[in-house]
Amino acid sequence: MNNQERKVHLFDVDHTLVRKNTATFFIFIAMKHKIIRFSQVKSLILDLIKYKIGRPDIDFIEKSINKLAGIKKSDLENIAQICFQTKIKQNIYSNAALLIKEAQKKGEKVIFATSSLDFIIKPIEDFFGIEGSLVTSLEYNGGKTTGKLNGYGLFGKKKKTAAIAWMEKNGIRPQDVSFYSDSYTDIPLLEYCGNPVVVNPDMKLKRKAKKNGWKILRFKELLPAK
């Protein structure tokens, strides 16, 4: 199989691979350890409401990150490890994990395509033996956050833009790509990929999936606690 025929699997993370929102897990633990203050993240509550009613702010990540300047990178990475071990790991859908492992056994490429932040996703990548995911990446200076991103937040149409650039760079055809997501905000990328798969979809995505004849999966079982 040459590079042009290699099957690729892109997985959204929040509510697709992981039952809940990974950033929410992280924020609560970071606040508990006094790495982040509530005043720095309170605007995210309004962003969540906008998302739920179908009117998300496409630039909400950039606007939120500018309040997080001056945090040590090492602190973020340490909290992310705690977050994975205490919250994220036991909230991974077992069926999603099985799909990833089966694809990897076949020699197929698997990466995450998520708006979540790089340091939150890194422990999940390590758990699955994945490298090079499409994630939102923070900018640092002197080992501390600047309040800016490296590039842009991978949310909505901007996730599609990043995925297309990644496919073109790696010589991957969209028809060879399966993309798994739960959210209506990922419809642009689902439409672009050859094999769109919706997982536990919200109502807007469910309607779109049924109209287009996309595969719908329902995940409930979680990885056993260890």
Image (tube, grey):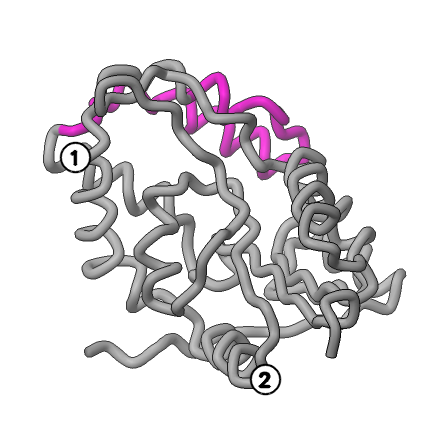
Q: Is residue 179 left or right of residue 125?
A: right
Say which of 186 and 201 sits in front: 186
Q: Disc number at residue 196?
A: none
Q: Residue shown at 32%/23% (left/top)?
A: 140
Q: Main secondary structure of the magenta part?
A: helix
Q: Residue shown at 53%/60% (left/top)?
A: 111
Spot occupied by residue 31 in the image (x, y as percentages of width and height): 18, 33
Q: Residue shown at 64%/54% (left/top)?
A: 202
| Magenta span | 35-64
Tell me the mark number nearer the camera, choosing from 1 and 2: 2
Q: Can residue 58 be seen at all in this image of the molecule?
A: yes
Which picture quadrant has residue 151? Answer: top right
Q: What residue would you read off at disc 1?
A: 75
N-term mark: 1 or 2: 1
Q: Is residue 137 left or right of residue 189?
A: left
Categorize mark 1 by other alpha carbons within 10 Å: few (<14), some (14-19), many (20+): some
Q: Residue shown at 34%/46% (left/top)?
A: 120
Tell whether position 44 is magenta. yes
Above/below status of 61 relative to 218: above
What is the three-letter code of the residue carrying label 1?
Asp
Above/below status of 40 relative to 157: above
Tell whether position 163 is magenta. no
Q: What residue would you read off at disc 2?
A: 106
Q: Label 1 vs label 2: CA separation? A: 37 Å
Quadrant occupied by the N terminus: bottom right
Quadrant occupied by the C terminus: bottom left
Badge 1 marks a residue whose secondary structure is helix
Say which of 200 and 78 sits in front: 78
Q: How many marks?
A: 2
